[in-house]
Amino acid sequence: MPRTTLQNVLCTFCASGCDNLEITYDGRIVDSARNGCAISVSRFTTADESRILKPLVRREGKLRPTTFTRAIDRAARILINAKYPLLYGWSQTSCEAISKGIELAELVGGIVDNTTTSCHGPTILGVQDAGEATCTLGEVRHSADLVIYWACNPVHSHPRHMNRYTIFSEGRFRKTRKDRKLIVVDVRKTDTAKLADRFIQIQPNGDYELLTALRTAINGEEIEQDFVAGVPVETIEEIADMMMECEFGALFFGLGLTMTMGKHRNTEAALTLVRDLNYVTKFVVVPMRGWFNVTGANEVSTWQTGYPYAVDLTQGYPRFNPGDTSAIDALARGEVDAALVVASDPVSHFPRAAVKNLLEIPIVTVEPKRTPTSDASEVVMPSAIIGVEAAGTIYRIDGVALEAKKVIEPPLGVRTDEEILDAIIKRVKKMGRDADG
Amino acid sequence: MAELLIRNGYVFDPLNGIEGERMDISIRDGKIVEKVSRKARVLDVSGMTVMPGGVDIHSHIAGSKANCARMMRPEDHWRDPEPKTKYTRSGVGHTIPSVFTTGYRYARMGYTTVFEPATPPLKTRHTHEELNDIPIIDKGCFPLLGNNWFVMEYVKQGRIDELAAYVAWMLEATKGYAIKIVNPGGIEAWRWGRNLRHLDDKVPNFDVTPREIVRALCQVNKILNLPHAVHIHPNGLSEPGNYQTTLDTMDCVHDIQRESGPTMHVTHAQFTGRKGWSWADVRSGAPEIADYVNTHDHVSIDMGQLVFTNVTWMTADGPAMFALFKFSKTKWFNADVESETGAGVVSATYKKSNYVNAIQWGIALELALLVKDPWKIYLTTDHPNGGPFTAYPRVISWLVSREARQRVIDKINKTARRRLDLPGIDREYSLHEIATITRAATAKSLGLGCKGQLGAGADADIAIYSIEPRKIDPAKDYKAVRKAFASAAFTVKDGRIVVKNGEVVRSVQGRTFWTKPEVSEGIMKTVTSDLERKFDDYYTVRMANYPIEERYLTSSQAITTRGDV
Amino acid sequence: MTDLVFTPTRQFRIPVTAECISPDFVAGKSLREIELTQVWEGNRRIKLGSLFKVQGEIGRTLDDCTVKITGNVSAVRRIGFEMTGGSIQIDGDAGMYLGERMQGGSITVTGNAGSWLATQMRNGQIEVQGDAGDAIGGSARGGTKGMRGGTITIHGNCGTETGAWMQSGTIRIKGNCDLYAGIHMKNGTIMIERNCAGRVGAQMTGGKIIVLGNVGGVLPSFQFEEIRAKAKVGDEKIPGPFYFFSGDVNEEGKGQVLARVTDNSDLKWNERLIER
């Protein structure tokens, strides 16, 4: 087969949405991936590692290869027989597959939740109380003269974020690094902090207090403490001045805010701070979402059910209340009696109480690569990697929808998430709700 | 070969001059035909009113801002769930219904075509994903062009031909239907936290004015022979008094004549129909606007009727949303879109006792009652800004019955009541006029010949309501009228019965309409090379990844036009 | 008082939603009707009688109705939903959303209660001997209207966001309270007898929060006003002295946070502000 080069390929690792990759491949082997960061290169060049190549079902305690049809049949039975099934994952697959997942959840009467529940769920909950002043990333590139990274480390988590969108980018109104100032707020001096014009070291779990203090300063009120979260009040007032005096400020925040003490109240405080700044100048906030299609999972879930994650469809209509209808909590309470996991590895990532109960129920996993979750499953369906072996729509951090391309063929016999879910749906419909083993 | 005969209803088909005649409508293979064979299924609708399916020209049902609103407002949803049924998917309703619920609720009211009126081009892939998922209705969307960098630069350079080719490229790239302008230049000013108020204010850094942008795009609309007028939401939405800007906007293109209809359509004219200097003092600017519309043929408007309930404001007009947020003090969402446009969402509640809300309520009705020609004014609530689309039957009752209006007038803020002309207006719409402003005129305005009418060749999209025109007087029996329009006896889509007695009995896939203007190769080459040079500077996506392929639309219906360039 | 007794027939793992376990629903019905009422157990519809043994007498009028539950119903949601009168007595642990949108009557729990206890409550009395979860007396998701009347008493500890968006009424926590008690509070009174984890009264615009133990620090958006000798909860006078703070200034709030001096030595530095 001749070597082919594909231009303008979208990377499907993090949510930065870099779509200018140039991939050269020969048959199924990718030789090079240009214009991407190191992580993106490995996504393409290591596609073949740890692959699940055949559908598997557990028989006599071991996972054994089987036919597609048999595996689908077993998966359908597991879901139909469950009284409180969980359909989880979704952030590393396409919107088309997510749409099928929601259809399946409605059909079998389950909870459909995505990885938002363990990373930026608090951001969404914050938005539900405080709103959000945001923009697409190009606006930051064009206009931002003040950039703040709060509780995130893009040098490592989103390696090209700064080149494409912030301090190392070139925009219409900000041409060079000198045209912008960078403030980094973190509990330790990260590699991103080393690039900052001002680094603010904050005490762990002090974000809520510091955000509140900044808001107080911006509203022209006096802060009575001398220090807030370990930061001197004079420094807080200087930062507040920088924020008010810029022409266009952009605040980016990460899991250091969403996952530390306060969670959605931390994000609410950040969102409210940015809102208040808009009375004085132009300011935006953009969360640093992780997985390449977690935003897509939220979007599809919202337009189809009204809610972005933790959607309970067990009673025939959508209900939403994280803490109740969310995957980790429902698992930890021992309520879930079956799980479908798509493109995710909760056994590795969930808290222990949830994992303990997850391991006691039948799991159907749909996944390209072997993981601890697939190892613990009753049924494993091998799937194609989105953006490498399968096309599909994904949403960038800022809500811009892009199309991930199919570059190379998946391993022989391996299907897309969308096809697999569709097959389960058809089987479930055929069996009807009450099929029993 | 499916045949259906809708027998013996009272037919209102304004485009074909039929006003309540008893006649049969014959359908074959999804189209209306002259007659059908004896084997046709018969639907006996004796004693009922038959109209073309509703055509909604302006309703924010799909896309990024609608979804951000849904995400931000779970409190809007939990009180109004829609359980799944044998034929329908589950969902949630109220002001920002989820997509399945949206389609079903429109169909239940006898509506069969709806247009999403404001989509940011960069995010229009999202809009189409949602439109694809909305069941039953046919649809389309209008891409926002009034703050677009390429547009403003071509306007500044006076290169109208290139601008036309660019708009042609954009309509095909976004699979959009018509040119939409929102707060021309003002959203670009919002990049710096500013706004524009008047037609001759300069857009910061671009040195063009709203007047120039609007005129240029209206010229382009004509050059490309697009099916609809330029659809515009003028500057000044958040000013207490803004009707003058609306008049100026309408007047600024009075010399640009379009063959197939008006040059400009001013949408939700209520929101930019206020007179006065301060909020304490606003009055209705409806008489002046209606007067202009009555005496000029190059403009049309739609109402943007207010309903006294909790609503969600959502619009591309970002700066206006922030300005108005300061009144509602609830939640504010904003999302600027690079190099193109913006969006804002705020939750709000309209109260009868609130002076301004009462005046606004009056303005939209005054517009509808003072504009004489029902072909020039259409029924909308600018869903969900003025009220949810499920309130249309209530609005209809206010139009057909003075008594129905009076009941509300008696309860609104006293000062507003004194200052509005509305209490003194007697006019009552007939069913024929209602059919005009909710389907015939809107379809005509959109240039959709196959919709809004029941002549042979039209799409078999039909609404049948439980109103017997000879037995009821809408002016007195407005409650029955309202009930009938809220819950269609039957809705037929492409010849198939989808609603029976207000319940969905079948779900079908509607088509997405979009416009494909053809221009000469030479001019398109010039424009694409301009785009190639600048695209990476302007956008953070590659030009090759920007256009939406036709295969993206589940059911695509392109309308080709021949441009004069 | 006529008592209707529900006893779980087994341990519930899958969540059960039983809004019908409420005086309003049972009043005037027969035992058979109640047993046949359909409830949700996960995604299945099931007769109430399959989940509970139902015995006793049913009051004919609402005020004459006492619903007793004996056993662990921590997996049962929405007991007492929108009740307007009568009483519910739970001898065991109660589940989430107990007494949601309650308008009258009383609920008592001998064990613990779940989260979202009495959200959007309008009136009535609730008393929990054990602990309670998060968002007691709060609002719906994304909403801004919390409880607006009635009294809630928790003898044990409670979770986060007690009294979120509270509009009126009284909440008493005899034990400890996690973060964000009184967040977005508009009016009403919250009294916490032991310690708070912190961030009390965040973004409050009105109302009063009294903490007898350690308040967990005060947010930078609160201003120290003075030391007060006493605090009032209804007619009851609580002896102090108390550090009295007003806020949240970022919301132009007129809320009050009172922290008893003896348990808040970490707030002593505020005393220097008295001289100003």
Image (cartoon, coloured by chain):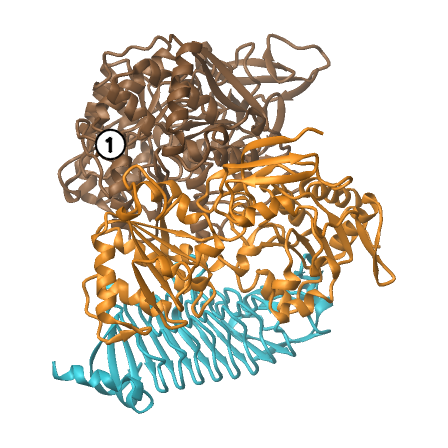
Chain colours: A orange, B brown, C cyan
Residue A93 seen in this snapshot: no
The disc labelled 1 sits on which kind of residue? Asn
Q: Is residue B518 left or right of residue C56?
A: left
In the image, residue A129 lies at what x, y percent?
39, 57
The N terminus of chain B sits in image quarter: top right
Q: Is residue C258 left or right of residue A12?
A: left
- Which residue is painted at 49% across and 16% down in the image? B559
Q: Is residue C170 above or below residue A410?
A: below
Q: Residues within 10 Å of mark 1 (few under 14, many from 20)?
A: many
In the image, residue B153 lies at what x, y percent?
28, 24
In the image, residue C39 lies at what x, y percent?
65, 61
Q: Is residue B218 above or below residue A93?
A: above
Closest to the observer, A398 or B214: A398
- Which residue is painted at 30% across and 77% down in the image? C218
For label 1, the residue is B235
Residue at the extreme right: A60
Which picture quadrant has residue A110?
A: bottom right
- Which residue is painted at 37% across and 33% down in the image? B537
Counting labels gives: 1
The chain identifier of the residue carrying mark 1 reads: B
Residue B349 seen in this snapshot: yes
Closest to the observer, A153 or B351: A153
The C terminus of chain B sits in image quarter: top left
Q: Is residue A102 above or below residue B561?
A: below
Closest to the observer, B517 or C71: B517
In the image, residue A317 lies at what x, y percent?
59, 50
Q: Is residue A365 left or right of residue B526?
A: right
Q: Is residue C276 above or below residue A44?
A: below
Q: Is residue A365 left or right of residue B33?
A: right
Helix or strand or loop: what does disc 1 sit on? loop
